[in-house]
Image (tube, helix red, strand yellow):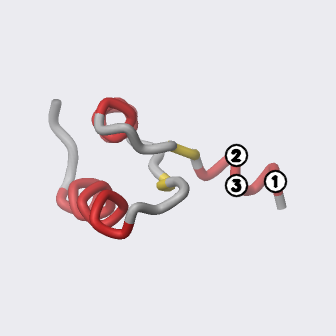
Amino acid sequence: MSFGRGESETIALAKELQTDFVILDDLAARKMATNLGLNVKGTLAILKKL
């Protein structure tokens, strides 16, 4: 899987801080985060909730 530095940093920080969820839109990054046990939300889900 290939994704950018921003997505990599976001996943690493979410793991380090043990966040409730992480916001990602890139499909490859979302799959990786899910595989690492993170709860993933997309931008549209956040906007819909607001």
- Residue linked to disc 2: 45
Q: Tell me where residue 43 appears, x and y as whole percent.
A: 61, 52
In the rendered structure, the answer to whether residue 43 lies left or right of residue 33 reads right
Label 2 Cα neighbours within 10 Å, binned few <14 / some 14-19 / many ≥20: few
* On screen, residue 5 above or below 29: below
For image coordinates 81% across by 49% down, the residue present is 48
- Residue linked to disc 1: 49
Residue 3, disc: none
Q: Are marks 2 and 3 in contact (CB under 8 Å)?
A: yes
Q: Are marks 1 and 3 in contact (CB under 8 Å)?
A: yes
Q: Quadrant of residue 20?
A: bottom right
Q: Give the spatial CA distance, label 2 vs label 3.
A: 4 Å
Q: In which quadrant will I find the C terminus?
A: bottom right
- Residue linked to disc 3: 46
Judged from this view, the residue extending furthest toward the front is: 18
Q: Tell me where residue 45 appears, x and y as whole percent.
A: 70, 46
Q: Give the spatial CA distance, label 2 vs label 1.
A: 6 Å
In the rendered structure, the answer to whether residue 6 lies left or right of residue 41 reads left
Q: Give the spatial CA distance, label 1 vs label 3.
A: 5 Å
The amino acid type found where label 3 is placed reads Ile
Q: Quadrant of residue 12?
A: bottom left
| Number of numbered discs overlaid on the protein picture | 3
Q: Are marks 2 and 1 in contact (CB under 8 Å)?
A: yes
